[in-house]
Image (tube, grey):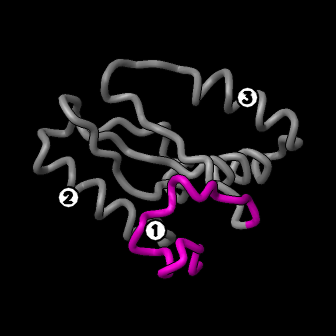
Amino acid sequence: MSDVREIEDWIEEENAGRGGELLEYGVEFRPAIVGMVTRCSFSDVICYDYDTCISILMRQGMSYDDATEYFSFNIEGAYVGERTPMVLRRVPWNVHVPDAIIPLCERDADGENEL
């Protein structure tokens, strides 16, 4: 998601069906929302992109180090119950994915990775 109005509409729609139970880190972090995480036996929670959250803090005047420390301690590390938002840390595309976790349907007849 990227358009703030689109994000606000999505939150409003999701909250309407859930009795307003979705928790946010704050309005300034709405551009960092990437979706919702569904967990068995728990309420669904909003999911934020870590790098976008750090960028938002840096645009507010923090250095990279200050932004990561602030986010880690004050936001990501703040547990406010089972509806606490989650943070997605993306795996860089150049990281090798072990063959053991590549589904068999994505391997060729010789067992080699087709990716």
In the picture of the structure, the residue carrying the numbered disc 3 is: 70
Q: Residue at x 37, y 70 (%)?
A: 6
Q: Of callouts 3 and 2, which one flags the residue occurring earlier in the amino acid sequence?
A: 2
In the picture of the structure, the residue carrying the numbered disc 1 is: 1
Q: Which mark is residue 112?
A: none
> How many C-alpha atoms fall within 10 Å of the one at disc 2: few (<14), some, or many (≥20)?
few
> How many C-alpha atoms fall within 10 Å of the one at disc 3: few (<14), some, or many (≥20)?
some
Queried whether the magenta region covers residue 40, the answer comes back as no
Helix or strand or loop: what does disc 3 sit on? helix
Instruction: Tell which of 89 and 83 is nearer to you.
Output: 89
Q: Residue at x 54, y 47 (%)?
A: 88
x, y percent for residue 107: 49, 75
Q: Which mark is residue 13?
A: 2
Instruction: Tell which of 110 and 106 is nearer to you.
Output: 110
x, y percent for residue 80: 40, 19
Disc 1 residue type? Answer: Met
x, y percent for residue 5: 40, 68
Q: Of callouts 3 and 1, which one flags the residue occurring earlier in the amino acid sequence?
A: 1
Helix or strand or loop: what does disc 1 sit on? loop
Residues drawn in magenta: 94-115
Q: What is the spatial separation of the Cα atoms under label 3 and label 2, in whole angstroms?
A: 30 Å
Q: What is the spatial separation of the Cα atoms under label 2 and label 1, in whole angstroms?
A: 15 Å
> How many C-alpha atoms fall within 10 Å of the one at disc 1: few (<14), some, or many (≥20)?
few
Residue lying at the far front of the rendered structure: 110
Disc 2 residue type? Answer: Glu
Tell me: residue 88, above or below residue 94: above
